[in-house]
Image: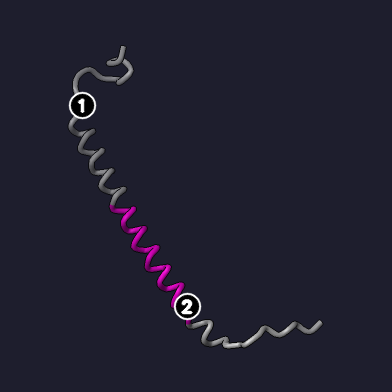
Amino acid sequence: MAKALLGYVGGSDPRLLAEMRRLQQRVQDLESELGRIQAENDALTATAVASHSELLDVPQAEPALT
């Protein structure tokens, strides 16, 4: 019954295992790249906020005219 559910008879297919390892490595690579890009984005955002606050050095916001 278990062999019928798996769809083949015998052990694991080496090609399938190799593809699984390749895909797992690709996922790990993409996760690490995502972490690097998020860290870079956070640094750029912090720099932009810091430089923006220096440009708009207003002691207190003024009310809008109505």
Q: Is residue 43 left or right of residue 29?
A: right
Mark 1, other Cα within 10 Å: few <14 / some 14–19 / many ≥20: few
7 is higher (above) or lower (below) than 42: above
- The quadrant of the picture occupied by the C terminus is bottom right
Q: Residue furthest right?
A: 66
Which of the marked residues, 2 or 1, is nearer the chain's N terminus?
Answer: 1
15 is higher (above) or lower (below) than 11: below
Identify the residue at horizontal 18%, vertical 32% (top origin).
14
Residue at the disc numbered 2: 48
Q: Position of residue 53 (x, y in %)?
A: 53, 82
Name which residue type carries label 1: Ser
Identify the residue at horizontal 22%, vertical 34% (top origin).
17
Q: Position of residue 18 (x, y in %)?
A: 20, 38
Name which residue type carries label 2: Ala
Q: Is residue 7 magenta?
A: no
Residue 12 sits in quarter:
top left
Q: Is residue 65 left or right of residue 13?
A: right
Q: Nearer the viewer, residue 33 or 64?
A: 64
Residue at the disc numbered 1: 12
Which colouring convention does the figure follow? one colour
Q: Position of residue 16 (x, y in %)?
A: 23, 33
Identify the residue at horizontal 19%, vertical 22% (top origin).
11
Give the extent of the magenta segment: 29-50
Q: Nearer the viewer, mark 2 or mark 1?
A: 2
Residue 57 sits in quarter:
bottom right
Q: Nearer the viewer, residue 1 or 48?
A: 48
Per the rendering, the mark at residue 61 is: none
Q: Residue furthest top?
A: 1
**Are the residues flagged by discs 2 and 1 in contact, CB closer than 8 Å?**
no
